[in-house]
Amino acid sequence: MIKKLGFWLLSVCLFLASVQPATAAWPQSGGLIVDHTTVGQFDTIPSSYINQAKSLFYGVYFHTSHGSQIFTGMDMLMSDNSLYDYFNDYYHYRFGTSNPIAPSGTLSLWNWDGTDLGNPSMTAWVNTTRTMLNNSNGDYQIYPHLRNLVMWSWCGQVSTATYDNIANDYLANMNQLETEFPNVAFVYMTGHLDGSGPTGNLYQRNQQIRDYCIANNKVLFDFADIESWDPAGNYYPNESDTCQWCSTWCSSHSCPSCSSCAHSHCFNCYQKGKAFWWMMARLAGWNSSGDPIPTPTPNPISQVLTLLANWLSNYSPLDFVADSKINGLDFSWLLSN
């Protein structure tokens, strides 16, 4: 056993010696704004960058019903093409190796349903995020759980939020979390449409979020903008979350179906699923308009320490495979020989 562990550690050291330091793709000037224009670029995304994203990122997405639209769209894409496979392996890390881990070639993305940026309060999400990332309450049997991408959605709270709510409860707290967890990508989000149009409070608060993200080089999933435009470039400033233009569009165009898209039309969900994968490809290093941007390779030392901690805490003579991969390289053979 000791000999095997020593050989394993030596192999890891040799691996580290061959790896160059990590380079982060973000922040970039102007940030990364995931809006309706990105959906039209979906078919141009190189598959290599989708695969790169699946190997680099381990995500968690907190949401309630409106936020689930992204997952519905992702499911629609996944049903047509395994390239867009993702897997919710929350239970693996939460309760142990008797629960499945995300298979190779899939994106590990936790589907954390039941809470959002305004539920149960406008600030409860901050400590929920911090506790999850630190495992400060000891909830996770397997830790570190590798989460390096965090998304939170709104429900309808932006419609009634004040300037200070957005500035202090949301933006300042997101920035604080980014400071505390510099190796985690935090995705900002606008609130869904409510029919109040450009003069309404929702539009003003969403624009406040956009302006901040652009000025401070953040990653923004512009939920509202995506549902404001049809694929032909027509703008619907007074649209609501039901997406009436989606029904009109699909009456004369071929549109995929789904069993349900929360509060809205399946095509709205589909568009958001495409936008999500565009975002992931960009975070993985793809530049849709020019030369490649630097690829954000995870820090190899932290990955090795994570692997070692997982292995030591979960070692069983009958289980050499779980949590034995770094950047897609499988080290389980070192543990089983």
Image (tube, grey):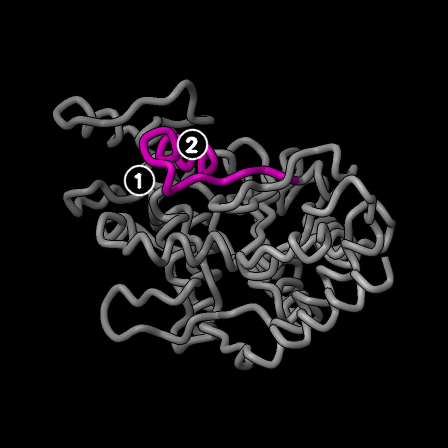
293 part of magenta stretch: no
Q: Which residues are magenta?
A: 69-89
Q: In the drawing, does residue 64 fall left or right of residue 127?
A: left
At x 63%, y 42%, the residue is: 116
| x, y percent for residue 216 | 49, 74
* Marking on residue 170: none
Determine whether the residue tagged by mark 2 lies in a helix, strand or loop.
helix
For the point 23% across and 72% down, the residue is 290
x%, y% of residue 294?
A: 40, 75
Which residue in the structure is indicated by mark 1? 238
For mark 2, what is the residue? Answer: 75
Instruction: Out of 111 and 198, give the one closest to the viewer.
Output: 111
Q: Main secondary structure of the magenta part?
A: helix
Kind of residue sitting beneath label 2: Asp
Q: Residue at x 34, y 57 (%)?
A: 48
Question: Mark 1: which secondary structure?
Answer: loop
Neighbour tally class for label 2: few under 14, some 14-19, many 20 plus, Cα within 10 Å: some
Whether residue 307 is visible, yes or no, is yes
- Mark 1: few/some/many CA within 10 Å (<14, 14-19, 20+): some
